[in-house]
Image (spheres, rainbow, N blue to C red):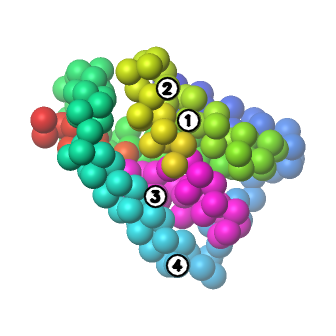
Amino acid sequence: MFYLLLALGGVVWLGARRGALPLALFLDRRSFGVDLLLGAAAGGALVGLWRGALRLSSEARAIAAYLRQALGTLGREEALALALLSGFAEELFFRGAMQQAWGLLAATAAFALLHLGGGRALRLWAVFAAIAGLLFGLLAQWRGNLLAPMVAHVVVNAVNLRQLRRW
């Protein structure tokens, strides 16, 4: 429900500012393949960064255990749906609406704060979210649409949720 409300908030915010949601906000048909590849590569790089953190940091492993417990038992289809919905909704809201209105740094900071929901125990997760949010925001600025950051975000969430399901 949270992600549906977040997406709706992004739609309303963008609609109020722009009057419409053009297809160009989400993708550029001329660079569709490039944006897909850039998103997949960025998502893969972030997955590698988090996996490195898991190997090197007991705090990262504690966060993974906390998230696993918070998520409970997710089926494969539920995990994929959550990855798709969260990646789409968060990018629509933070990069599509907030970044366009308030700028890259404000959207990145707000995105990181959202991931601090569990308090001090999740501070490393919030740092990772800030790095990811900055990368997603730079992709959105560079490419001029949300496809690359959405793909990157979905890749990160899908791989991490899959990993959490295995533990």
Disc marking residue 112: 1
Question: Which region of the structure is painted magenta?
Answer: 132-156
Q: Which residue is mark 4?
A: 34
| Residue 3, position as x, y percentages in the image | 52, 32
Name the residue carrying label 3. Answer: 152
Judging by the rendered image, the residue that carries numbered circle 2 is 116
Q: Amino acid at mark 1?
A: Ala
Marks 2 and 3, how far apart in space? 20 Å
- Residue at 46% x, 17% y: name it: 119
Choose the circle earlier in sequence order: 2 or 3.
2
Q: Nearer the viewer, residue 4 or 103?
A: 103
Of mark 4 and mark 2, the one earlier in the sequence is 4
Tell me, yes or no, whether the two marked residues, 4 and 1, touch with CB atoms within 8 Å: no
Which one is closest to the eye, mark 4 or mark 2?
A: 2
Q: Is residue 18 above or below residue 30?
A: above
Residue at the farthest left position: 167
In the rendered image, the vertical position of residue 8 relative to residue 119, given as above or below: below
Within 10 Å of the Cα at label 2, are there few (<14), some (14-19), or many (20+) other Cα atoms?
A: some
Mark 4, secondary structure of its residue: helix
At a point 29% along the width and 35% down the height, the residue shown is: 60
Asked which secondary structure carries label 1, the reply is helix
